[in-house]
Image (tube, helix red, strand yellow):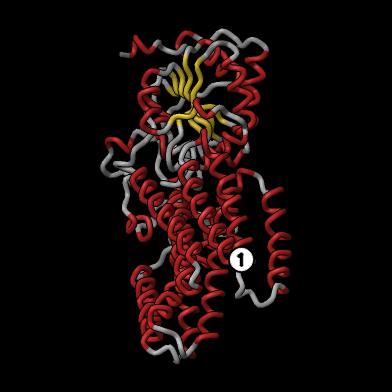
Amino acid sequence: MLDAAVSLAYVVAAGLFVLALKWLSAPATARHGVLAGEIGMFLAIIGTLLRTHVASYQWIVVGVVLGSAIGTPMGLFMPMTAVPQRTALSHAFGALAAALVGTGEYYLQAPRVGTFTMTALAVEVLLGSLTFTGSLMAFGKLQGLLPGRPITYRGQNVMNLSLLAAAVALAALVVARPGLTMLFPLIVALALVFGVLLVIPIGGADMPTVISLLNSYAGLSAAAMGFVLSNDLLIIAGALDGSSGFILSMIMCRAMNRSFSNVLFGAFGRVKEGPAAAAPEKPVRSATPEEAASILAAARSVIVVPGYGMAVAQAQHQVRELYDAITRRGVDVKFAIHPVAGRMPGHMNVLLAEADIPYDRLLGLEDANPALAEADVALVVGANDITNPAARHDRTSPIYGMPILDVDRAGVVMVIKRSMRPGFAGIENELYYLDKTLMLFGDAKAFVAEITKELAEGGRVPAPAARPEPAAARR
């Protein structure tokens, strides 16, 4: 009877995991996806605890208490702007758990480990170990504890691949001869070092892809653990996690028009130092909050383009207030979301959802570009490389070929930015020097609040040159 109840809990949990992934793929159903995933995980945990092979609950209780003590404050007090860092830590903890379980199972079963089980153990420990340290490095870069730029040196790729090859070769040897227990710690150590060296040469601009790729590795490690423990639900959950992370990584690479090898070994995202990164001498047009408010008040359609600068300034709630102020004037306001905006997939969606921006106001890349061509005003809040027209025509640019948001095709472009400093690609943004572009220099949170205040007070009449040109006239 108990075994039947456990099997039923596993089947229902597996179904809920599949539904969670399905619903999480769209903002309108994302909350249902989160709830389905939570219920599924609860059933999975209860079903596992009820299995007859559990010898003692003492250490399980200790683990639950420690995990709750760490996880509860993270969930309650970590701001939404720090979701990428929290996600990286979650990957690290999950991968560490898989690596520790694999290590424990190896020493419990060695040398009487079958070839299939030993192969699964090797995959579990290798992926779990490198994902653990790689995720910690990603957390450090995102949190500012480590340099966000790529850390590179001559022969780095050769060294990294040699290190990985050595770890795999030793793992293959242990698979063939499970009794070589003295080699196992060396395999773990090589994997841990490889995880560090894998991520440090990757720049901040590639963090969305790196996080989704580490998610895939953690999932595959969990699936391998399921084979070791003969747990079907763990195999299903790990496979879903691994495949979804891999697919998401592919989507991110396509969004940047880059390959996996280029992300992992190309050191994209190098912040230029010295004169190359200094403010250019080209003239730019700037505007005050009063002028920006007047332009928005005179518009019929506005597209807001959020970026990492909005997350850093924690300006999402001020953006919501601005949205309310503009829409009360009868202006049609939408949000254009680039797939790699921010520091993780869906970063902008999460922040805007926290501020209760309506889901139907969010446009993906394919829908946003036609809307931008018809918009009177494009308001860029802290986005840089994803709006750079150089990606369309400059073959020498590191972002050439990357799909961008066609912000430059709107009637008037306003960019909220602290300075003219380049983004993570380390290049100037041609958008800032167009005649139709107005630079709004300042902190995004404070500047948006000032614009909202001016709109509430009625706004001033804009200068004729700053008035949005009707979409029909631009065509």
The amino acid type found where label 1 is placed reads: Leu
Q: What residue sits 72% from the left and 53% below the top?
A: 73
Kindly give the residue lying farthest to the front in the view shown. Answer: 1
Is 379 on the left or on the right of 450, as rendered?
left
Q: Is residue 314 above or below residue 432?
A: below
- Coordinates of residue 64 in the picture (x, y in percent): 70, 64
Q: How many labels does the image show?
A: 1
- Coordinates of residue 398 in the picture (x, y in percent): 33, 47
The C terminus: image quadrant = top left
- Coordinates of residue 57 in the picture (x, y in percent): 70, 72
Residue 304 visible in the current orientation: no
Q: What residue sits 66% from the left and 45% below the top?
A: 79
Q: Nearer the viewer, residue 46 or 2?
A: 2
- Coordinates of residue 34 in the picture (x, y in percent): 57, 45
Q: What residue sits 60% from the left and 58% below the top?
A: 145
Residue annotated with mark 1: 2
Which secondary structure lies at badge 1?
helix
Q: Is residue 7 above or below residue 340?
A: below
Is 241 on the left or on the right of 90, as rendered?
left
What crowding class fits label 1: few (fewer than 14 Cα within 10 Å), some (14-19), or many (20 or more)? few
The N terminus: image quadrant = bottom right
Q: Which of 304 and 412 is in front in this view?
A: 304
Q: What residue sits 58% from the left and 64% below the top?
A: 93
